Image: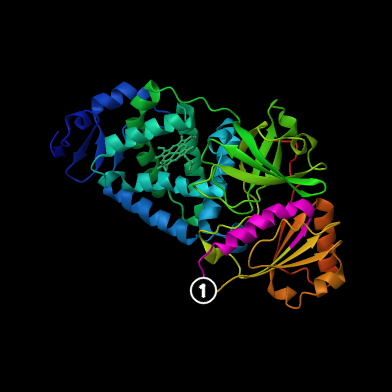
Amino acid sequence: MGGIVTIESHEDASLIYRARDGSIRIAEDFAKGYEKEMPFEVKRPIVTLEHETLIRQHWAAVARGTSVFQPAKHITPAKFFYTTFYSKLFERIPEARALFRSSMSVQGRSLTGIVSTLASIIRSPDVVETTQNLALEHARFGATKDHYTAVGLTLLETLEYVSGPEWSIQIKNAYLTTYCFLYYLMLPVILSTKPSTIDASIPGRITIVKNITENAKCLTIEVDFPLRYHPGDMVVVGPKENDLDTCVPFPISSVYDANVKSLEICVDEVSTDWLYAATPNTIINVYWVHSGVHFEIDTPETIYKKLLFISEGLIGAGFNSMIKGLSLVPDSNPFDIIWMQCDAKLISYFTPPNCRVLYSSTLTIEFLESIADLTQRHVYIGGSEVFITNSFALLHQMGLEDLNTHSYTLDIARTSINIQI
Ligand code: HEM
């Protein structure tokens, strides 16, 4: 065929070639051998320089925030993208939830790895090797052939959703063609490598048990897995007997440290008797990190400076981690933090740095009025659903229903492991 220049490596040339127009194509014999395994309609993907430009421009627009991005609701364009992607993915393939144990907010950054791979393959000098190594790595993550189809479909759906009117058939074709191109290159590895079996949970060993009040304990749980999380995230755990009905999300009270293989949670008899009774060396099931209200301290510009935390009892563990996390942010304009604790007694174990702690056994209008600049603060309320309802009712009575408030409750989906991200 005129105009075709095969690439240098002999091995690669049997799989792909570059044309003089700069496009990159799948070799015909290779495509013929694998086309029956290709679930998408693009059986002969040709990735052009125009596709690359479209993907780069489109992705830059998504990263800036398209017209359907709403800052108050979606927080950041990246967050809008990854929360949409993962909720669609787990709806389509719920069993894939266990592949993504770390916090979604952290893994969202890996997700952008897919798009950057799509945006860069045409210029990559070793596209076959890179792609096939990625497929090998993914077999270790537990990714199956069907997962690739689901990820491709979900990626397209998500890109369309977050683009709003900025989506077009040309942009869709650019992503789909490039995804199919990568899929072809990965297919020999996908078909010949058995993916790791992924269990719903991994073992967590309790290493330290500290009494923090008369009826509450702090447990240190060690896991042999790089479980990453943000301050405020929860960890979903259950008893070793694998009784999914008793699996519960707990706020993590520690702050993530890449060098430490453990995390801390606080428990009391009321929240869970089986965990409260646990002793050092007890093994429990650790499922995954659940991201709800949290701080992405690696992008501190997304966090408001004047903050008020209002907590009931042990739910304060999540706030403890959020406030400790803020103290690690290098910032010349420090955070101004007040924490109002409400319970039978002050939990003195929760004493994060750089924060004024106030205590009252119950939340009252008088207690709230003691915060002179209440209306200037972002308010985080954590506790049972009753506590949260009552707190909002008090703010309403004070005429403060427009305050910027975020609520955080332990009552969420206590008995289900299908927790929404
Ligand atoms: C063509 C398709 C795909 C591409 C280009 C791709 C790309 C990537 C990249 C670049 C990373 C980061 C790797 C690293 O940091 O070492 C990654 C991580 C990951 N991918 Fe994929 N991926 C694809 C499909 C899939 C599929 C089908 C699954 C399974 C459902 C999957 C699951 C994962 C997991 C579990 C991680 C690690 C996440 C973490 O711990 O941060 N990926 N992927």
Query: Furthest-left residue in view?
Result: 2
User: Which residue lies under the disc numbered 1?
Assistant: 332
Query: In the image, what residue occupies the spot 43% across and 51% down?
Result: 168
Q: Looking at the image, can residue 418 be seen?
A: no
Which residue is at the front of the view, 85 or 302?
Answer: 302
Camera-side residue of 15 and 253:
253
Q: Is residue 39 depicted above or below 349 in this figure?
A: above
Relative to 348, residue 110 above or below? above
Q: Is residue 84 magenta?
A: no
Across and down, in percent, residue 139 comes to: 43, 29
Work out which quarter of the rendered image holds the N terminus and state it: top left
Which quarter holds ligand 1? Answer: top left
Q: Is 395 left or right of 117, judged from the image as shown?
A: right
In this picture the colour scheme is rainbow
Write down the region rendered in magenta. Answer: 310-331
Categorize mark 1 by other alpha carbons within 10 Å: few (<14), some (14-19), many (20+): few
Q: Is residue 295 left or right of residue 112?
A: right
Question: Dividing the picture into quarters, in which one does residue 12 lie?
Answer: top left
Report the residue at 32% width, 49% height from top: 52
